[in-house]
Image (cartoon, rainbow, N blue to C red):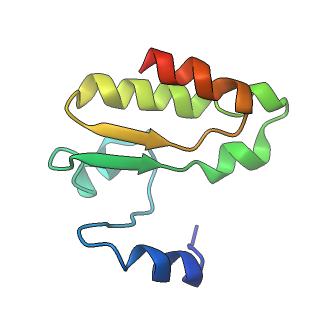
Amino acid sequence: MKPDTQFLEAVCGFPMVYYMVGSIDNLDDLLRCGVSFAANMVVVDKESTMSAEEDYMADAKTIVNVQTLFRLFSSLSIITELTHPGQHEVYAVQS
């Protein structure tokens, strides 16, 4: 999935910010992007947003994956995009 040019131009204005295409499910992708050295990570899952059959289930895969990431790399501060508004408060309490 190729990012928009406008997105890349906006991100390049911040020092030490890198955009990587990969899967949060794949440990090799995470290690390739330097997750073990990162202080912060932003997770965006465009696929689940577009393919969820039911609105409230759109974030299920992202939430499970981010919880797993947090257990593997507990010092990592993770910000994630959630599709369903009802998940925002619930997820903020759990992490």
Which residue corresponds to the image point at 70% horizontal and 40% vertical from the top-left? Answer: 83
Residue 40 % position (x, y): 29, 47
Which residue corresponds to the image point at 25% horizontal and 27% vertical from the top-left? Answer: 72
Q: Is 35 located above or below residue 91 in the figure? A: below
Count of marks placed on residues: 0
Q: In the image, is 37 to the left or to the right of 66?
A: left
Residue 16, quarter of the rendered image? bottom left
Residue 45 % position (x, y): 58, 48
Q: Is 73 located above or below residue 5 in the figure? A: above
The residue closer to the viewer here, 82 or 49, is 82
Residue 88, quarter of the rendered image? top right
The residue closer to the viewer here, 18 or 14, is 14
Q: Is 62 located above or below residue 2 in the figure? A: above
Specify the quadrant that holds the C terminus.
top left
The residue closer to the viewer here, 95 or 59, is 95
Which residue is farthest left? 37
Which residue is farthest right? 53
Residue 13, quarter of the rendered image? bottom left
Q: Is residue 3 visible?
A: yes
Residue 79 % position (x, y): 43, 42
Q: Is 10 located above or below residue 30 in the figure? A: below
Q: In the image, is 11 to the left or to the right of 83?
A: left
Specify the quadrant that holds the N terminus.
bottom right
Q: In the image, is 50 to the left or to the right of 44?
A: right
Which residue corresponds to the image point at 25% horizontal and 37% vertical from the top-left? Answer: 76
Q: Is residue 60 visible?
A: no
Residue 7 % position (x, y): 54, 75
Which residue corresponds to the image point at 28% horizontal and 57% vertical from the top-left? Answer: 33
